[in-house]
Amino acid sequence: MDEQRRGSARKLWDIARRDLGLAEFASGHREEFANQIAFQCQQSAEKILKACLLAAGFEPPLTHSLRLLGDLLAQAGLPTPDEFDARFLSTFAVGPRYGGWEVSSEDALAAIEAAERVMAAYEPVLRRLLGESE
């Protein structure tokens, strides 16, 4: 893998961790920031999956669909995200950002948990692809 692709994958990984960190930080204020929390969780999952695709030598498409990214990961011979988590988190990609609907406090918490599962599943994959130890 060339150094530019490796750097792009690492950058997406770092942003994914910060997106999830922001959601976790705001979790104490779920009533007020549920929409933003859910969106950041979706973004975290999207970015870690795209980082894995980059590290595997694939150019990730401009999409928010975690299911589509999962299909591409499968084509690359990599594990696919949990179907429920991918579908659940994908619902927060657009609507809550623009006031299309309100996310409940419970769904914001569930989004954090789902994004944490995605991160936990894909960080080891990304480390392996980048040739890094844990």
Image: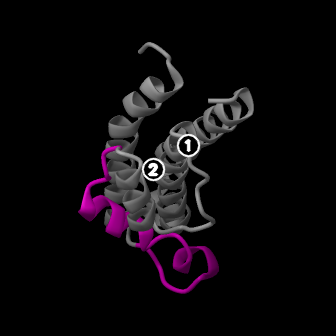
| Residue wearing tag 2 | 27
Type of amino acid under label 1: Ala
Q: Quadrant of the C terminus?
A: top left
Q: Secondary structure at mark 2?
A: helix
- What is the span of residues highlighted in magenta in the rendered image? 78-103
Q: Is residue 3 left or right of residue 96?
A: right
Decide which of tag 2 and tag 1 comes sooner along the chain: 2
Q: CA distance from mark 2 to mark 1?
A: 25 Å
Quadrant assignment, res 17: top right
The number of numbered discs placed on residues in the rendered structure image is: 2
Residue at the image point whose x is 47% and y is 79% from the top? 102
Q: Nearer the viewer, residue 89 or 132?
A: 132
Q: Position of residue 80 (x, y in %)?
A: 31, 52
Q: Which mark is residue 51?
A: 1
Pick out the residue farthest to the bottom: 100
Q: Quadrant of the N terminus?
A: top right
Q: Position of residue 15 (x, y in %)?
A: 63, 41
- 98 is within the stretch colored magenta: yes
Residue at the image point whose x is 53% and y is 76% from the top? 96
Q: Position of residue 113 (x, y in %)?
A: 32, 49
Residue at the image point whose x is 53% and y is 80% from the top? 95
Pick out the residue farthest to the top: 133
Type of amino acid under label 2: Ser
Up the image or down, 82 lies above or below 10; here it is: below
- 91 is within the stretch colored magenta: yes
Q: Nearer the viewer, residue 61 or 30?
A: 61
Q: Secondary structure at mark 1?
A: helix
Q: Is residue 47 left or right of residue 120?
A: right
Give the crowd class for mark 2: few <14, some 14-19, many >=20 residues within 10 Å. some
